[in-house]
Image (tube, grey):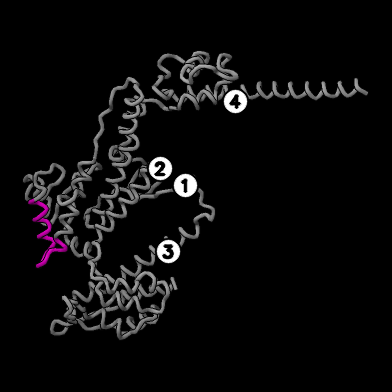
Amino acid sequence: EIYRIVASVLHLGNVGFLEEEGKSKLTNSMAVHTTSQLLGCSELDLARALTHRTIDARGDVVTSPLNREMAVYARDALAKAVYDRLFTWLVRRLNTSLQPQDLRDNHTVMGILDIYGFEIFQKNSFEQFCINYCNEKLQQLFIELTLKSEQEEYLREGIEWEPVSYFNNKVICDLIEEKHKGIISILDEECLRPGDPTDASFLVKMTEKLKSHNHFISHQKADKKVQKIMGREEFKLVHYAGEVTYITNGFLEKNNDLLFRDLRQVMSETSNSITQKVFPAAEVSSKRRPDTAITQFKNSLSQLMVILSSKEPSYIRCIKPNDYKASGIFEDKIVSHQVKYLGLMENLRVRRAGFAYRRRYEEFLNRYKSLSKETWPQFKGSARDGVQALVNTLGYKHDDYKMGKTKLFIRYAKTLFDTEDAFQLRKHTLAASIQAQWKGFVQRRKYLRMRAS
C-alpha cells in the first residue's frame, strides 16, 4: 500500500489541464484513471474534485468549477498532502515499532538530530525562510545551553570570572515569530484575511510594521547602493549567519497550501487503509480552517525545542571546506564564514576562559578518595574539605582549579587526565592489597584445619 501511494503521487503529477470559458478541463484522463486505481477511489469523483470546489456557506452548499490555475493548485496541494501524510504516518509507525516494551519511569533516551544547514542561495524563497528560521531557533538553544548557561553556572557557584560577550540571536527569532508582530503573524494574517491578498501586499504590510527593525531590510528601507541590486519584490533579513535576501513570490501560495474539501472527502473514501487513516472522515465534516504551513512548521519546531531543552546535547559541527565537494581543498573565506556563523569562536572563548571539567564534591571525593591517606578509606569531615585535602595531596596548582559552592572546577583537561591515570594505577595497589588479605585468610584457614586434624 505504501508503494501504491508513492506511485499515485507520481502519476498525479502527470495530470494536465486546459481552460475553456474560465473552466478547467482534464487533458490526461489516463493519469487520473491510474491514480484512482492506485488509491482505490472513484475515478469520476477524483476527476470532479480536481476541477470543482464545494463551499459550505452557513448551510448553503455551492459547487463551482475551478479555472486552470486553481485546478493546478488543487492537484499540487493533493500530491503534497498525500506524500506529507504518508511520510508522517511512516515515521510514527517506525517510532512505535522501535519503542521498547518495558518502559520504566527513569528510562534513558539517546537521540540523533541531523539538521539541515543554513541556506543562502542566489534565489531564496519560502523553503529557505523556514530552514533558516529553524537554524535560528537551534542557534538560540545552543546559546542557552552552552554559552549562557556556562556563564550563569560560574556566577551561581561564586567562581571569579570575566564574562565573554557573544551575539544573542533572540532578537532575530522574535522578528520572525513574535506574536502579532513577527513575520509569521504578518504572513498568516495576510493569507487568512478576506479580499485579494498577494505576495506584494504581504511585503507592503511587512515593510510598514518592521521598517524600524535593524535586522529587516526592504527595497524601500535600503540605501541606494543596496536598492540597485535588490528587487522590489524582495526583502532581506540579517541572520546570525549573515544577510539573506528572500523573494516573496509564492510565499502566500506555499503558506496556504489548502486542500479543498472535495479532495479530502475523496481521500477519506479510498480503499487504501493508510490513506483512510491519514485522511479521517471527521476532518471532512470539520469547519475549522487548517493551520498554515508556517504555523505547522512553527508548532513542530516548538515541540522539538522542548525535547532538546530537556536533554543534555552534544554538538557535532560540520565545516564544508569548499563548494566543489573536492578533497584536500580548504577555502579560507568559506571556512571562516562557517566558523563565524556557527558561533564557534564565542564558544571557544567561553571554554578557554572557563573550566573543562566540573563535578559535585561528593562524586569527586567518592571516586578519587583512595589517592590520599587523609581521605582513604573514609573522610569524616564535609565533602568540600575532603576534596580540598585530596587536591592538596595531588599537587594541584592554584590556577588549575577553583572551589565553588557545591562543585570542584578543573580548568585543564590534562589535570583531570593525570588524576584519572593516578587512580587507575592506584587500583592495582588496592587489588594487590585485597588479594593479599584474601590469600592470608585462605592460608590461615588451611593452617587451622591442619592443626585441628
Q: CA distance from mark 4 to mark 1?
A: 30 Å
What residue did someone put label 1 on? Answer: 109
Front disc: 3 or 1: 1
Binning the other alpha carbons within 10 Å of mark 1 as few (below 14), some (14 to 19) or many (20 upward) gives: few
**Is disc 2 placed on a helix, strand or loop?**
loop
Question: Mark 2 or mark 4, which has the lower sequence index?
Answer: 2
Type of amino acid under label 2: Lys
As rendered, which of 114 and 107 lies closer to the eye? 107
Q: CA distance from mark 3 to mark 2?
A: 25 Å
Binning the other alpha carbons within 10 Å of mark 2 as few (below 14), some (14 to 19) or many (20 upward) gives: few
Question: Mark 3 or mark 2, which has the lower sequence index?
Answer: 3
> Which residue occupies 24% across, 35% down?
167
What residue did someone put label 3 on? Answer: 90
Tell me where the magenta segment starts and ends, as one range.
190-208
Query: Please, what is the dominant secondary structure of the magenta stretch?
Result: helix
**Is disc 4 placed on a helix, strand or loop?**
helix
